[in-house]
Image (spheres, grey):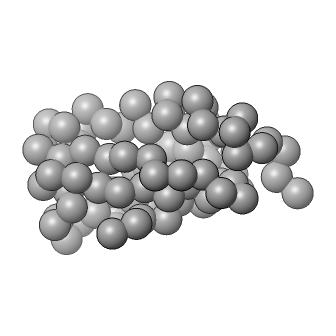
């Protein structure tokens, strides 16, 4: 069982994503947290990131890895289009 409620995860998730956001903004994109449900963070890319073919790598290598290191290794991230 995941040790945090979805509500408890919101601020840590936002703080963690804020570490990656400057990289996205520099490339003309951004990311938005849509919701957190059952320790799964649903995000949407905006701007240049929304159509970028590398967004899956960004999702896995930057967003998911950062959240897993900062919060919990079992947290999941899913892109909402």
Instruction: Look at the picture and state if 9 lies above or below 46.
Output: above
Q: How many labels does the image show?
A: 0
| Left or right: where 22 falls relative to 8 | left
Q: In which quarter of the image is residue 72?
A: top right
Please say whether residue 60 is visible from this viewpoint. Answer: yes
| Left or right: where 28 falls relative to 75 | left
State the residue at coordinates (15%, 52%).
Answer: 47
Instruction: Look at the picture and state if 47 lies above or below 10.
Output: below
Q: Residue furthest toward the right?
A: 1
Please say whether residue 61 is visible from this viewpoint. Answer: no
Query: Residue 70 placed where, x, y %?
Result: 60, 36
| Left or right: where 42 falls relative to 73 | left
Query: Residue 33 placed where, x, y %?
Result: 44, 47
Report the front residue among 26 and 38: 38
**Quadrant location of the C terminus in the rendered image:** bottom left
State the residue at coordinates (26%, 32%).
Answer: 22
**Quadrant location of the N terminus in the rendered image:** bottom right
Query: Residue 16 placed where, x, y %?
Result: 50, 34
Report the front residue among 16 and 47: 47
| Left or right: where 80 falls relative to 76 | left
State the residue at coordinates (72%, 35%).
Answer: 8
Query: Residue 31 placed where, x, y %?
Result: 32, 47
Report the front residue among 15 and 80: 80
Instruction: Look at the picture and state if 16 lies above or below 6.
Output: above
């Amino acid at each position: 069982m995941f040790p945090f409620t979805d509500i408890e995860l919101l601020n840590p998730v936002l703080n963690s994503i804020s570490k990656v956001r400057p990289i996205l903004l520099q490339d003309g994109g951004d990311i938005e947290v849509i919701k957190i449900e059952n320790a799964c963070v649903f995000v949407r890319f905006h701007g240049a990131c929304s159509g970028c073919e590398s967004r899956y790598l960004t999702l896995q290598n930057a967003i998911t890895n950062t959240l897993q290191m900062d919060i919990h290794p079992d947290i999941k991230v899913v892109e909402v289009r």
